[in-house]
Amino acid sequence: MREAAFVKQNKNKWLKFEEELHNKKSPDPQAISHLYLEVTDDLSYAKTFYSGSNTVTYLNGLAAKAHQRIYTNRKEPGNVFLNFYTRDFPKMFYRHQKQLLLSFLIFSIFIAVGVFSASSDAAFVRAILGDAYVNMTLENIAREDPMAVYKQMGEVDMFLGITINNIRVALMAYTFGILAGLGTVYILMQNAIMLGSFQYFFHEQGMLWESARTIWIHGTIEISVIIIAGCAGLVVGKSILFPGTYPRLTSFVKGVKEGLKIVLSTIPFFIIAGFLEGFVTRLTGMPDFLAIIIITVSLLSILFYYVYYPIYLNNKKLNANK
């Protein structure tokens, strides 16, 4: 990229950073820190390709001012975890809404593939879920307790086992993003096809509602967060394929860090999903309205935290800067 094009592409960001630095209203240190990281990345790029230029001199000065402002205006750290979940992460995640949407679309498409395949081939469900699981479920249906599988383990053992397994799947979806995002797509495909064939199996047995109102008590959060972990993997893949103005290695490191933050944000939700599956889903006799309330609250919580809240914080910041 020519230097003039590089300057034109990033000029507005640098000017915005200067405004933040000269803001006498005690600007948000986190916002400055984020912009500081971007400017230092730009400085690294400029040093590599435009060594000794005015652009390098300008960015050096800007980075020095930012460093001084950050460390002279830093507040006491307070609760690091609370700040991460309530402020730092949502602000960062706003930039990855497109990857979240893409992860959701990929998952939805492969759910449809699972449903279509199960409806077209009677052996497909057994190939995906296994003969042992299908036979056991058919026996449970015959005994008029189709969801008995959720009552076989102790509550605590099931809670711990499910939570650990779900976190493992999320980490796989994230780390496989290093394969240019294709590994993440594969993990999403596996889980989505399994879900689609699973739900079609119960539909075929005339138990779709019974399965849905039971499974989605924990599955609403569990499946949603697997999609979000898929978003983390796609962020890593994007950083490799589309580095933008950054050197590819710099872009990759940044993508890995932000993807890891996305995965870390899901851990409390996986714990909640594991708790629901271990202690609540087994209560198959609960009234439908109570199951619907749990499912609805779970869905709204996910949408609030990962969609609405990041947009709200971003708009709040934009309005404050006007």
Image: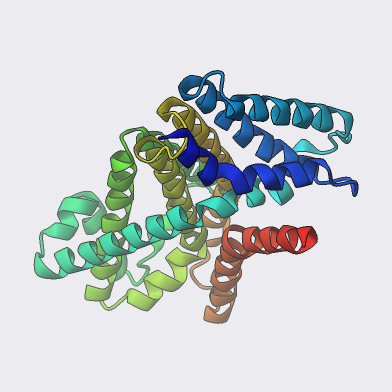
Above or below residue 64? Residue 262 is: below
Q: Position of residue 22 (x, y in %)?
A: 83, 43
Would residue 251 be visible to someone looking at this image? yes
The C terminus: image quadrant: bottom right
**Horizontal side of residue 118 vs 112, given as left or right:** left
Above or below residue 56? Residue 194 is: below
Above or below residue 12? Residue 214 is: below
Report the front residue among 30 and 284: 30
Q: How is the image coloured?
A: rainbow
Would residue 205 be visible to someone looking at this image? no
**Horizontal side of residue 303 vs 255, given as left or right:** right
Residue 172 found in image quarter? top left
Q: Position of residue 177 (x, y in %)?
A: 37, 38
Total numbered labels placed on residues in the image: 0
Report the front residue among 174 and 219: 174
Report the front residue among 250 and 78: 250
Q: Position of residue 110 (x, y in %)?
A: 26, 60
The N terminus: image quadrant: top left
Report the front residue among 167 and 66: 66
**Horizontal side of residue 31 vs 39, given as left or right:** right
Q: Position of residue 18 (x, y in %)?
A: 74, 42
Residue found at x 49% / y 53%: 225
**Horizontal side of residue 5 vs 34, given as left or right:** left
Residue found at x 31% / y 34%: 179
Residue found at x 75% / y 64%: 319
Residue at the extreme bottom: 289
